[in-house]
Amino acid sequence: MEFHIARDPGMPDIGVIEGAILDQDPAAVIDLDPAGGTVRLSTWMESRQLLAVLGRAGWKLQPERIDQQPSPCCGGCGG
């Protein structure tokens, strides 16, 4: 699943977030859109799991801050 989260002043360093996510999902992809100030995450986790992991990493978010994106999967790879 892909999620977008707008940065805020309480956000820890992106490296801390990346470490916390990768501990749970080593195949996750995390990046920061410098133009829009959005953290983009692709992971197998559902939003409630992601919320818990980010909270443990020090980024306390309300559930509505996590914006789940439509799946970009075309099914062509069989994954």
Image: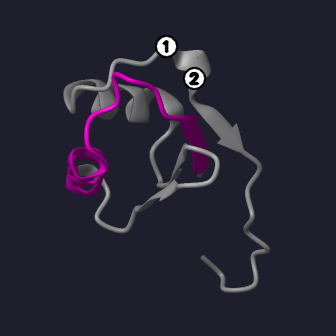
- In this view of the protein, which residue sits in the foreground, 57 or 48? 57
Judging depth in this view, the residue of 7 and 35 nearest the camera is: 35
- Residue lying at 45% horizontally and 26% vertically, measured from the top left: 8
Number of the label disc, if any, that sits on residue 62: 1
**Quadrant location, the C terminus:** bottom right
- Is residue 51 found left or right of 77 in the rendered image? left
Please determine whether, in this image, residue 21 is positioned above or below residue 29.
above
Asked whether 17 or 46 is in front, the reply is 17
Residues in magenta?
2-23
Secondary structure state at the residue bearing disc 2 = helix
User: Residue placed at 56% from the left, 44% from the top?
Assistant: 38
**Residue 12: percent from left, percent from top:** 27, 35
The image quadrant of residue 53 is top left
- State the separation of the CA atoms marked 2 and 1: 6 Å
Do tag 2 and tag 1 residues touch (Cβ < 8 Å)? yes
Which disc, if any, is residue 65? 2
Percent coordinates x, y for residue 40 in the rendering = 54, 51
Residue 52 locus on image (x, y percent): 33, 26
Quadrant of the rendered structure where residue 5 is? top right
Crowd tier of the residue under label 1, counting other residues whose Cα lies within 10 Å: few below 14, some 14–19, many 20 or above: few
In terms of secondary structure, where does tag 1 sit?
A: loop
Residue type indicated by callout 1: Gln
The residue lying furthest to the top in this view is: 62
| Circle 2 crowding by C-alpha within 10 Å: few under 14, some 14–19, many from 20 | few
At label 2, which amino acid type do we have?
Arg
Q: Residue at x 66, y 39 (%)?
A: 68
In the drawing, what numbered circle is on residue 31?
none
Q: Is residue 61 left or right of residue 66?
A: left
